[in-house]
Image: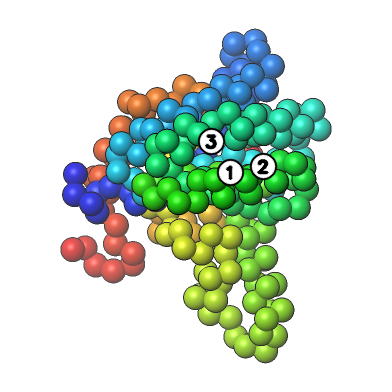
């Protein structure tokens, strides 16, 4: 595989935890637990592929609309996952980063997120980006509002916007995978996905494995990206 055929930034919309659980007559939270567990191995596989940035959509700004029990359960799972897995992730040479709005997240979780970022900040092999309380519209609005606050009269450029996004140094996603059959972005990487390639699979996230990843990466390797220009 030449470098161009491999995504530099792979993004995954982790969907289908609820359906995975329902199919097994389990509570939805068990699906979320299985989904988070899956991530450990995925970090290892993605690193083995030589991918530099790996982002996952774990909780959207719209997911607050779910029943409060489910939301609280997810927050607890995030707490547990960060505490228990940070060492393994660091041992892989991965730097943990969080992407999203800080408001509404429980203060102790936020504190733990900041700690995990700091604890892994010197790792350079892979950036593992967890998008929690992330929404593409919120990100664009937050960027626009901070630019206006800094320079009220200046026309906004694309560069201004990018430099005010949550993670300005992270390149746009090359490949976005969505599991579980839904053919939509659900407010993920809205601006950044302008020229992303998409890959959809019916597999529920907790069942996504090495073979599925291989299939998606092979498919990506055969895509021709033109960015509005002419065929090479
Ligand atoms: C994805 O699984 C995880 C989150 C959005 C938090 P879902 O909970 O959306 O699973 P389905 O779509 O109901 O199966
Ligand atoms: C998208 O999944 C958000 C995450 C995976 C975190 P949803 O399950 O929330 O999306 P919709 O509601 O089906 O569009
Ligand atoms: Mg869903």
Asked if residue 121 lies left or right of residue 114, the reply is: left
State the SS at label 1.
helix
- Quarter in which the C terminus is drawn: bottom left
Q: Which residue is mark 3?
A: 86
Q: How far apart, in angstroms, are the residues tagged by discs 3 and 2? A: 11 Å
Q: Which residue is mark 1?
A: 116
x, y percentage for residue 141?
A: 67, 66
State the SS at label 3.
helix
Q: Which residue is mark 2?
A: 112
- Quarter in which the N terminus is drawn: top left
Q: Which mark is residue 15?
A: none
Q: Residue at point 47% right, 31% down?
A: 88
> In terms of depth relative to the viewer, which is nearer, 193 or 100?
100
Q: How far apart, in angstroms, are the residues tagged by discs 1 and 3? A: 7 Å
Give the mark, 1 or 3, whose residue is nearer the N terminus. Answer: 3
User: Mark 1 near mark 2, Cβ–Cβ under 8 Å?
Assistant: yes
Q: Quadrant of ligand 1?
A: top right
> In terms of depth relative to the viewer, which is nearer, 125 or 206?
125
User: Mark 1 near mark 3, Cβ–Cβ under 8 Å?
Assistant: yes
Give the mark, 3 or 2, whose residue is nearer the N terminus. Answer: 3
């Amino acid at each position: 595989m030449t470098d161009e055929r491999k995504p530099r930034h792979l993004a995954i919309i982790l969907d289908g935890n609820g359906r995975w659980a329902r199919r097994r007559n389990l509570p939805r939270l068990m699906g979320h637990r299985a989904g988070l567990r899956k991530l450990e191995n995925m970090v290892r596989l993605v690193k083995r592929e030589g991918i530099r940035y790996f982002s996952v959509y774990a909780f959207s700004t719209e997911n607050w609309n779910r029943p409060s029990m489910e939301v609280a359960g997810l927050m607890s799972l995030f707490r547990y996952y960060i505490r228990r897995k940070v060492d393994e992730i660091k041992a892989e040479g991965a730097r943990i980063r969080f992407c999203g709005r800080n408001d509404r997240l429980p203060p102790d979780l936020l504190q733990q997120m900041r700690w995990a970022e700091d604890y892994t900040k010197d790792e350079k092999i892979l950036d593992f980006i967890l998008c929690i309380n992330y929404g593409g519209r919120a990100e664009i609005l937050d960027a626009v509002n901070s630019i206006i606050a800094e320079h009220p009269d200046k026309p906004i450029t694309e560069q201004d916007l990018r430099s005010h996004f949550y993670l300005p140094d992270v390149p746009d996603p090359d490949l976005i995978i969505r599991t579980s059959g839904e053919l939509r972005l659900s407010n993920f990487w809205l601006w950044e996905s302008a020229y992303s390639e998409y890959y959809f699979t019916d597999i529920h996230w907790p069942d996504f494995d090495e073979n599925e990843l291989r299939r998606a990466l092979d498919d990506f390797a055969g895509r021709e990206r033109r960015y509005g220009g002419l065929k090479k």
